Amino acid sequence: MGGPLRECVPGQAEGGSGGDVFRSRQVAMAFALLLLGAVMAAACGGSSGGGGGRPDQHVSVSLSDNGCTPSSFTLDTGTVVFTVSNVHSSKVNTFAIDRGGQLMGEATNVLGGLSRELTIDLPIGDYTVHCTGGGAGGSGTLTVR
């Protein structure tokens, strides 16, 4: 009657091998995973600012023998870049931020004529700002909303 009997294997084309179909599925799965990884990386990265895609906030702080100006701040949550400048103070050379006694960040050795940047991610809360050095200076407040 006809030719030899052949067993029908699901996913196997006539005359083909089951391994070819399996390899094709592996390649398709690998491609899908790579594409998913690329999409996730694009969604999570690429922002120059912090705080969920918000741009960085920039704040200028000037040190003096009495502390810093301004000494009180109200900012939005996210990444803040403080540019700390010391035009002529020979006593105050440090700008620090703490929360409940825990140091969050500081710019130190900001000597007369120098500027330093302090970049910090700030969650919502109340902070204390210290502008000190050489027994002089003062403190202020920072509120992040």
Image (cartoon, rainbow, N blue to C red):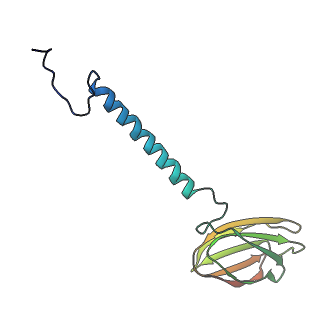
Indicate whether 14 appears above or below 60.
above
> Could you tell me which residue is drawn at 84 percent across and 67 percent down?
111
Q: Position of residue 17 (x, y in %)?
A: 28, 23
Q: How many marks?
A: 0
Residue 129, horizontal then vertical, whole percent: 69, 79
Q: Quadrant of the N terminus?
A: top left
Q: On the rendered structure, is 10 left or right of 55?
A: left
- Residue 45 at x, y percent in the picture: 59, 56
Residue 98 percent location from the top left of the image: 62, 76
Q: Residue at x 63, y 56 (%)?
A: 46
Image quadrant in which the C terminus is located: bottom right
Furthest-front residue in this view: 1
Horizontal arrangement in the rendering, residue 19 relative to residue 72 (left or right): left
Front-lying residue, 18 or 121: 18
Quarter residue 56 falls in: bottom right
Q: Locate residue 108: give its quadrant.
A: bottom right
Residue drawn at the location 36% of the way across and 35% of the way down: 26
Q: Is residue 26 left or right of residue 40?
A: left
Which residue occupies the extreme left position in the image?
A: 1
